[in-house]
């Protein structure tokens, strides 16, 4: 990962995570609004529902040693550690996030079973075969080398263990390449959210076969999560959020002003919410 991109991602999350927690809580990911995207529900419940739906989809009923790749402020790590009575390790590029996740673990009486550290997901500081569940919820889009990222997830996974990866994708291009307008739309999203690039779900599946993961499954849940961006936009323009944005700095303000890019990306079928799971 280039030093510049590493620094951009770190600074983006250092600056914005406190505001996100204040407005939205501990889960820094999409919510689940039913398979057809029409269920009305509390926004935080929708985020918890996404975790539960993912576990159900991937057939995960137990775990002992969990790695949360791109852990944010520990939302998934703490939830999974508590649900499965498991150990959970979270990694992030943001020292602010790692420190807050550690605080939250203390508040939840989960300090003995969880740890959070600053680490690069493309060069993880863990031994081979360390975790029986590797969980990556909306971090793959930040990775400059998607193959290296998945190779690292595979390396630290125990034999028989499961990888669950959920990431932003662009539409499949087997039938028609991306248009110039679609490319520009993606570039605008990359610039705002510190992404090097995204790929399609079929491309991720091809990498997974090369690893080789077994029992590979993929799914596109774009319809189920797309309402999330309308809810985020609505919540971004409350007095509390606007005051927080002013204090968070320009990169966070720019992110808020660009929320419509993601909403329009889903509406036109360009942005896809891709799921992949498999066993080592």
Image (tube, rainbow, N blue to C red):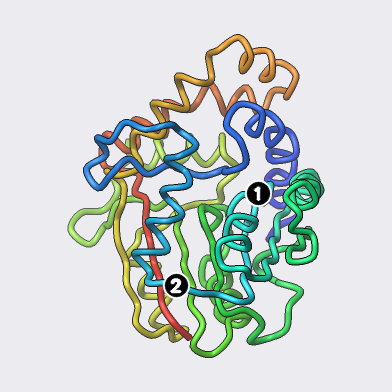
Task: Return the residue found at the far left.
Answer: 175
Of discs 1 and 2, which sits in the foreground? 2
Q: Residues within 10 Å of mark 2 (few under 14, many from 20)?
A: few
Q: Identify residue for label 2.
A: 61
Q: Is residue 105 visible?
A: yes
Q: Identify residue for label 1.
A: 72
Question: In the image, which disc is placed on residue 255?
Answer: none
Q: Secondary structure at mark 2?
A: loop
Left or right, residue 44 beside residue 86: left
Q: Secondary structure at mark 1?
A: loop
Q: Residue at x 63, y 86 (%)?
A: 129
Left or right, residue 234 beside residue 123: left
- In this view, the residue in front, 7 or 124, is 124
Residue 133 x/y as whole percent: 55, 74
Determine the image quadrant of residue 120: bottom right
Q: Residues within 10 Å of mark 1 (few under 14, many from 20)?
A: many
Q: Considering the image in quadrants, where does the N terminus appear?
A: bottom right
Q: Residue at x 69, y 19 (%)?
A: 244
Q: Residue at x 18, y 58 (%)?
A: 175
Left or right, residue 99 beside residue 12: right
- In this view, the residue in front, 259 or 244, is 244
Residue 182 x/y as whole percent: 33, 40
Q: Earlier in the sequence, mark 1 or mark 2?
A: 2
Q: Is residue 81 above or below residue 253?
A: below
């Amino acid at each position: 990962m280039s030093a510049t991109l590493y620094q951009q991602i770190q600074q983006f999350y250092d600056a914005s995570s406190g505001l996100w927690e204040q407005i939205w809580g501990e889960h820094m990911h999409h919510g689940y609004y039913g398979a057809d995207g029409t269920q009305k529900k509390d926004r935080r419940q929708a985020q918890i529902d996404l975790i539960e739906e993912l576990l159900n989809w991937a057939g995960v009923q137990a775990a002992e040693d969990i790695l949360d790749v791109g852990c944010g402020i520990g939302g998934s790590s703490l939830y999974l550690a508590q649900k499965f009575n498991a150990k959970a390790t979270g990694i992030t590029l943001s020292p602010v996030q790692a420190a807050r996740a550690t605080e939250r673990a203390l508040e939840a009486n989960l300090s003995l079973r969880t740890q959070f550290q600053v680490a690069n997901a493309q060069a993880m500081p863990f031994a081979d075969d360390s975790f029986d569940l590797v969980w990556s919820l909306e971090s793959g889009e930040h990775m400059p080398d998607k193959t290296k990222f998945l190779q690292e997830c595979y390396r630290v996974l125990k034999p028989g263990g499961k990888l669950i990866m959920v990431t932003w994708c662009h539409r499949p291009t087997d039938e028609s390449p991306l248009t110039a307008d679609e490319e520009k739309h993606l570039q605008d999203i990359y610039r705002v959210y510190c992404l090097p690039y995204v790929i399609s779900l079929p491309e991720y599946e091809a990498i997974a076969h090369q690893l080789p993961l077994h029992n590979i499954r993929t799914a596109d849940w774009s319809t189920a999560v797309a309402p999330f961006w309308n809810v985020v936009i609505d919540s971004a323009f409350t007095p509390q959020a606007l005051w927080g944005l002013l204090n968070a700095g320009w990169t966070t303000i720019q992110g808020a002003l660009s929320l419509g890019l993601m909403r329009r990306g889903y509406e036109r079928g360009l942005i896809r919410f891709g799921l992949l799971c498999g066993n080592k």
